[in-house]
Amino acid sequence: MEHDLPPDDLPLITATLAGDTRAFSDLVLRHQWSVRAFLLARLAQRDAAEDLAQETFVLAWQKLREFDISRPFVPWLRGIAENLLRNHLRKFKETPIGGDEALQAMLDARLEEMGQGESGDPRAAVLGECLSRIDGPSSQLLTARYVEGKSLAELCDLTGRKHSALTMQLHRLRVILADCIERKTSA
């Protein structure tokens, strides 16, 4: 039988299935970095990533009998981690600072300020300056999304770009704006 497992994983998996907890401990030591890196790259909170990594190995221990030894082990572990991550994100539904709603509210306040003179939100006052630092297609994208109110589907049609690419660019622009606003209002 041919295996995609590294040659030293198969004996550890076999020994673990026979009841050798030390063998599973060796598997954990060997693959914990990969699982942690996978989760840390996808979560802002280090503690949550560490907890999910531990939970991944607990679940792997419980489900090891279901593992197909003709398949690679690390992708199986990452699959468990990915499912746990998906459940975590669904359960805790983190709202990023500077998300669509927050940026829209600041833009609305800024537009109101430009039309009437004053806004109660000090962040709206510096928003114009932060926005002026963004130019070209990024500026056009922000205008289309937040000033003109175009949906992501409309933007995908207009730009010919994929939904994921646009949401990632908008996220990055919101982070840039939130950082700029935070620096200016803290100073």
Image: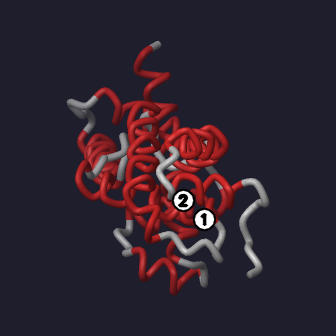
Task: Tell me the residue at 37%/56% (across/down).
Answer: 62
- Residue drawn at x 28%, y 40% is 113
Furthest residue in direction top, as rendered: 187
Q: Nearer the viewer, residue 26 or 149?
A: 26
- Image quadrant holding the N terminus, namely bottom right
Q: Is residue 120 visible?
A: yes
Residue that carries the numbered disc 1 in the rendered image? 75
Is there a contact, CB below 8 Å, between mark 2 and mark 1?
yes
Q: Which mark is residue 100?
A: none
For the residue marked with disc 2, what is the amino acid?
Answer: Arg
Q: Depth check: give the residue in front, 163 or 160.
A: 163
Could you tell whether 90 is left or right of 157 in the image? left
* Residue 46, horizontal then vertical, whole percent: 46, 32
Q: Residue at x 54, y 83 (%)?
A: 158
Q: Position of residue 52 (x, y in %)?
A: 40, 44
| Residue 8 locus on image (x, y percent) | 75, 54
Task: Identify the residue position indicated by label 2 in the image.
Answer: 78
Q: Secondary structure at mark 1?
A: helix
Q: Could you tell me how far apart the alpha carbons at marks 2 and 1 are, in whole angstroms? A: 5 Å
Judge the density around disc 2: few (<14), some (14-19), many (≥20) Cα neighbours within 10 Å.
some
Please indicate, yes or no, whether residue 146 appears anywhere in the rendered image.
no
Q: Nearer the viewer, residue 185 or 69?
A: 69
The three-letter code of the residue at mark 1 reads Pro
Percent coordinates x, y for residue 170 in the rendering: 50, 58
User: Which quadrant of the figure has residue 50?
Assistant: top left
- Seen from the viewer's position, the closer of residues 96 and 144 is 96
SS class of the residue under badge 2?
helix
Q: Is residue 107 left or right of residue 67?
A: left
